[in-house]
Amino acid sequence: MKNSHSESYAAAGVDVTAGYEAVERIKPMVESTYIPGVLGTLGGFGGMFAPDMAGMKKPVLVSGTDGVGTKLRLAQLMNKHDTIGIDCVAMCVNDIICGGAAPLFFLDYIACGKNDPVRIAEIVTGITEGCRQSECALVGGETAEHPGLMPDEDYDVAGFSVGIVDEEKIIDGKRLTEGDVLIGLGSTGVHSNGFSLVRKVFDIENADLTSPVEELGGKSLGETLLTPTRIYVKAVKALLKAGVDIHAISHITGGGFYENVPRMMTEGLTAQIKLDSFPRLPIFDLIEKKGGIPTRDMYNTFNMGIGMILALPAQQAAQALEILKAAGEQAYQIGQVVSGEAGVELV
C-alpha cells in the first residue's frame, strides 16, 4: 500500500491514500466485532465466515439488505456521524431475526463525494456498535469516492447481513392461530423510516436542531430524531432460547402498522391491535400536530412507539414479557390474532 499513489487519479478527485488511511483507522473497530467463525482479517477481497452448523438438520441462510435513507441528511446537518451506522445494521438484522435466523455477519457500503478518513471512521464506529449489539461480525465492506456525482461532504450508507436458522425452526407465520397474543417491543423513536416526511414537516434544512424542545422532554429535535434504531436480535434470541414458541414476527419499518403487520399474518387471520395498550412517543405527537397529518397516515408511515411485534401462544405471554424485561426491552401486550381478512385492525 505504501507504494500505491496515483497523482492522475487524485487530480480526478479520488485520493487512494485517504482510503488506506480510513482502513487503518477502522481496523481495530472491525476486529472488535469478530465472533467464532470469522476467517482472515480486514483487507481481503472477500469476507469469509465458517458457520457452526452443529445440531442443525437442514441449515438455511437468511439474508437482508437495506440502507439508512434520508435520515442521513440529519446526521450531515448535525455533523454527527457515529450513530448512523447502528441504523444501517439494525434495518438488516431486525429483518433477518423475523425469520428466526441469528445474524452471522454484516458488510457495509459507504459512497461519498470525498473520502474523509476521520468521518469514515465515525460512520464505521456506529456500524461496529450495531454489529456488537446484534452479535454478528463485520467481515468486510467498501468505501467508494464519487467525485462529480456527489458533493464532497455528502455520503450514503447501505449494507447487508446473512444469518442462519434450522429449517424446522423458521418463523414464517404458518403456525399462527386465532387467539395468539401480540407482544410489542418498544421503539427508540422514528428509527430509520419516514424521514422524507419528517424533513418536510420540520423544514429540516432550516430547523433549529439543537435547542431543547418542551414537547420532547427537553431534548433537542436533532438529538431526538437522530436516536438510533433499536436492535431486537438479542431479545428475540433470548425468547427462542427459553423455548417461547414464537409464531410470527413483524419488523415495523417503512409503511408502519398497515403495511408491515399484514406481512406476518396468514390467510383468514388479522392482527387486532389496541392503541391504548402502549405509550405513543412524544416525537410522533409533535410530527402529527406540526404537519397536520391524519392519524391513519401516521400509523401508515411510522412505528408510533412499537418497533417489532411478536405473535405467540396466549399461555406464554407472561413468560415472554418477563424475559423481554430481563433483556432490557420495553414490551407490551398489545392485542391478539383474530379471524378476518383485513390483516391488521387498530382499535
Image (cartoon, grey):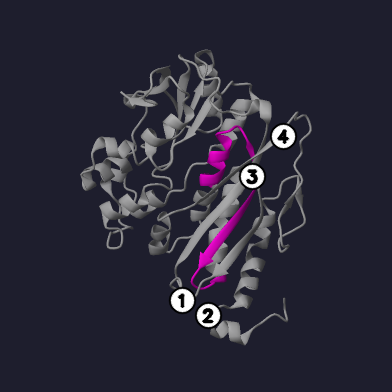
Residue that label 4 marks: 59
Amino acid beneath label 4: Pro
N-terminal of the two: label 2 or label 3?
A: 2
Q: Residue 295: image x %, image y %?
A: 26, 36
Region rendered in magenta: 90-117
Q: Name the residue under label 3.
A: 162
Q: Could you say which is closer to the camera, residue 173 or residue 292?
A: 173
Q: Looking at the picture, tell me which residue is in the foreground, 271 or 315.
A: 271
Callout 4 environment at 10 Å: few (<14), some (14 to 19), or many (20+)?
some
What amino acid type is highlighted by mark number 1? Gly
* Image quarter of the C terminus: top left
Q: Quadrant of residue 174?
A: top right
Q: Given contact means CB atoms under 8 Å apart, are the residues at marks 2 and 4 in contact?
A: no
Q: Which of marks 1 and 3 is nearer the N terminus?
A: 1
Label 3 neighbour load within 10 Å: few <14, some 14-19, many 20+: many
270 in magenta: no
- Which element is circle 1 on? loop
**Mark 2 highlights which residue?**
13
**From mark 2 to mark 4, how far is it between C-alphas?**
46 Å
Residue 62 quadrant: top right
Which residue has dot 1 on it? Answer: 148
